[in-house]
Image (cartoon, helix red, strand yellow):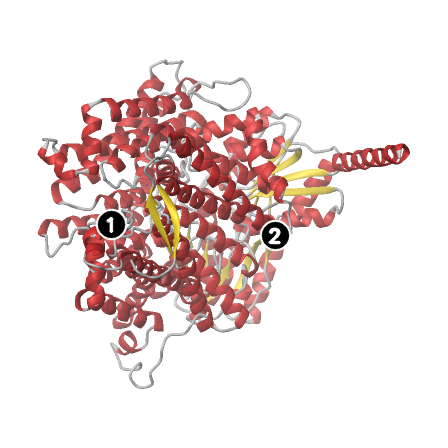
Amino acid sequence: MIGFWESILLTVITAATPLLIAALGELIVEKSGVLNLGVEGMMAVGASTGFAVATLTDSSSIGVLAGIAAGMALSLIFALVTLGFAANQVAAGLALTILGLGLAGLIGAKFVGTSRIAIPPIHIPGLSDLPGIGKLVFGQSPFFYLSVVLAVGVAWFLRRTRAGLSLRSIGENHASAHALGLKVLRTRLLAILFGGACAGLAGAYLSLVYTPFWSPGMTAGRGWIALALVVFASWLPLRVFLGAYLFGAATILQMHAQAASMGLPSQALSAFPYIATIVALVLISMRRVGATPAPGSLGTAFVPPR
Amino acid sequence: MNIMVKVAGAAALALGLAGAASAQEKLKIGFIYVGPVGDHGWTYQHDQGRKAIEAAFPGKVETTFIESVPEADSERSIEQLARTGHKLIFTTSFGFMEPTLKVAAKYPNINFEHATGYKRAKNVATYSGKFHEGRYVQGVIAGKMTKTNTIGYVASFPIPEVVAGINAFMLGAQSVNPNVKVKIVWAATWFDPGKEADAAKALLDQGADIITQHTDSPAPLQQAEARGKFAFGQASDMIRFAPKGQLTAIIDDWAPYYVERARVQLEGKWQSQDVWDGFAKGKVKMAPYTNMPDDVKKLAQDTEEAIKSGKFNPFKCPVFDQSGKEVKCEGNGALSDGQILSMNYYVKGIDDKLPK
Amino acid sequence: MRLELIPRSDVSSLQRTLAPLWAILIALLMGGLIVAFLGRSPLAAFKVYFLEPLTDPWALQELAVKATPLIIIATGLVYCFRANLWNIGAEGQLIVGAIFGSIVPLATVGMESTPWVLPVALLLGALGGALYGSIPAFLRVRFGVSEILVSLMLVYVAELTLDYLVRGPWRDPKGFNFPTTPNFESFALLPNLASEGRLHAGIIIALLCAAVTWFVLNRTLFGFGIRVAGEAPRAARFSGFNANRMTIAAFMISGGLAGLAGIVEVTGQIGQLKPAISGGLGFTAIIVAYLGRLHPVGIVFGAFVIALTVYGGEAAQITLKLPLDLTRTFQGILLFCVLAADALTTYKLRIVRGLHA
């Protein structure tokens, strides 16, 4: 029985990791006051570039790096238009989604139908073999550890560092932050690039770990879920972590309910994760436990006054 | 100078005419795809069929496709093909049925072929494959190979084709193993690799040791392979994705049918018809039987051969529904095509409720 | 070296009108480069993508058919976006509108011609969308829950509800258990406006929506309240506008129009319900709303630009055998260029050497 629950937990972790990574990136972007709705597009480009480069170089690590780079490159276009030209962020983000899905298809076209071995989980002799928790704590995919480090790192960065503080104040009110001498556009550029890197990494995870092949449409809306998670978490990194796992668990458990023949309509079960997210959010909001509202300048362009 | 101009003009005219003439001779054939050609499954196989037409009639045909056409917004795409000189148009998903009929009514001189639908017209033919024949063979293999007596089924949506597939699979498995159980997870998608993989994992976690799928991506197969379990490929031979895990795969081979229909169109003998065939005509094929002992392989081959030659029908009567009631036998010793094409119940032995 | 934006003091309306044209020109050059890079003729691509659709009457009708739902949804979104409310769930409201609107047409399948069915269907469609749109508004007003998340999550719930209905209770009994409802009777369908081609009365509804929205925003107290709520929320509070009521009203109008778009799409060109009836119109409309600068007239143009890229993309697949991904990429480039050009009408771009700022 322990093996059964351990196995379910592993599945949940696998499903939650890409959501978590992409959402943490977007969290930093939104904390700086920028709303980039193009996560899905950046993820797709990360997935196809990651897989293509991994296949060409026969190295999954280089593939992952390429996925990150591709996500960053795409986010740079977004940065140019929204920061450089002060264009509307919502529209630019949606345009980025379309562009990303198109580019991903072009990049990956030659690699459809090829398979790779998934990047294996870490194995620490002794520790990974401990009964019960061994595999859960010491035998995960390297991406899982990375995602945990990212979550803790992002939380620490925002709360404990000077740079994190200035990022937050820029997101809260860019005019007064600028008046205080903070570099609004440069900070936002770096935040957007970080978001692109995370989305690209999440994409590479899809095509190199989760389901190791490339196919157009394989992101299947995960970028949108990541965006929703940031809001769900009311912009708190550790709550993003919680949200990703809650959502992952809801998805996996409804499948187990089906496999165990509970006889509910499959549509009701498929809707469960989404409804659960809404209900959880209502409960959080009702109790108002440290709920933080959206960053004050979220989604608005900043043009330095002269 | 004057002569030069005239000659050049004449040459250009001649070239132009020649161009026009050869364009007229070439038969233009169009395809509407519901997914991207790179989906590994359904659309990919239709595109293989399109390429087969090009290869079979070099210089005589020109093929075109529009991919990822949303079903609700397909009438324009179909009509665009009709308006650009395509004389034979294949619409390759059930959701294109009404739009195909609407466009066909406007263009009586163009012939249409709609996959998996049931409404026809003078210039609209329908065609599909008896994929459940392959599923029966899979069931036989799975029933033999399973050690836990539990098989996991990753399903897409409860439409008749999928339900009939589950039933054929179960009947095949029961024919060799009376204790076999099938667990079903509806992934509510045709293509979402992550979700399909999760469904496969859930089934494996609940004791299934063989996975079969009616969704398009190779993800469930990969998951089975990664856990040292077995699975079946979908729509195309997916052995590349699971060299140690794939037992066989149902291959949708549209090529022979497409080439044949292009040929009758070229000869001016095209007629509306309804074709539903399987192993016998080569529309449904099995990938090589791999990763199984010789006796199972032999059994699978014999079953395939029996179905192919018409000696055996997967839905041979009597068929019992879940409640144990015998289903009325409307065909010749087996369920009729119409009964199979509209199947909306599980057969006896499936311990689950069909979602409605 | 860096870029600096300087606000323009004198933006003529001519400049603002011409900006998108410049953008399209630049996008064409970039798209042309990609096409040339793939070894095809950029001129041919231009012809297929832009010239032919805009000179062929049949294609123009198709553009209008495609633009119709986009215009209706995007004008609805204006109410929310102008009030700084993030309704990104128009897709879900569209689907629920289509479901509500289909109740009566489905109940009258097989009946004699009944003239009131269509108007009732349209009204119920708008009502369904409005009710569904009120959920995120209510949760925001009552519990302070983010409307972004709730409206997005409700999209998935709406899709699955439609899926359940067409596979279950509303399935065509004569349809071999395939997931579609019966076809609506012709009296439940929007009338066709052309003898050849598919132009239907939906475009009139769409243009009416745009006109009424223009009037409401510019000439009524409610429209003023919406604009103030968005631009200066504190001022709105002082001047006595009830923010909560405003939120619910904006969302219900927005959802109502999305729902109307849904039933217009069903009665205008689909003629029945299927598991998927939209294919992302509700999301595309967000781009349309911003392409149109949240202005009803701009939205009409924006919707036609999007329709053109969709139509041209298909034409390019047919005539030039260009892959769909390429036309998507071009769509993305085009949108970025339009957005950037838009900004350049408001600001002058200056290249500054040095790093201070």
Report, in whole angstroms, how far the alpha carbon at label 2 lies from the one at label 1. Answer: 39 Å
Q: Which mark is residue A298?
A: 1
Q: Is residue C223 above or below residue A265?
A: above
Number of dots carrying numbers: 2
Find numbered disc 1 in the image and state the secondary structure of the residue it sits on: loop
In this view, the residue farthest toward the bottom is: A126
Residue type (three-letter) at the residue carrying disc 2: Leu
The answer to whether residue C210 shows anywhere in this view is: yes
Give the chain of mark 2.
Answer: C
- Work out whether residue A271 or residue C141 is closer to the camera in this orientation and state it: C141
Q: Position of residue C250 (x, y in %)?
A: 22, 32
Q: Residue at x 43, y 43 (%)?
A: C335
Question: Residue A104: x and y, percent?
Answer: 48, 55
In the image, what residue occupies the spot 39% across and 67% down? B148
Residue C177: image location, x then y, percent? 43, 37
Q: Residues within 10 Å of mark 2 (few under 14, many from 20)?
A: few
Depicted B82 relative to depicted B186: above or below: above
Kindly state the secondary structure of the residue where label 2 is placed.
loop
Chain label for disc 1: A
Quadrant for the N terminus of chain A in the image: bottom left
Position of residue A291 measured from the top left corner of the image (x, y, whole percent): 13, 54
Query: Residue at the spot x=9%, y=52% of the render?
Result: A287
Say what amino acid the circle numbered 1 marks.
Leu
Q: C83 and A189: which one is in front?
A: A189
Q: Is residue A278 above or below residue C303?
A: below
The residue that disc 2 covers is: C38
**Labelled disc at residue C334:** none
Quick one: label 1, few (<14), some, or many (20+) residues within 10 Å?
Answer: many
Q: Nearer the viewer, residue B331 or C228?
A: C228
Q: Is residue B326 visible?
A: no
Out of C235 and A195, give the one closest to the viewer.
Answer: C235
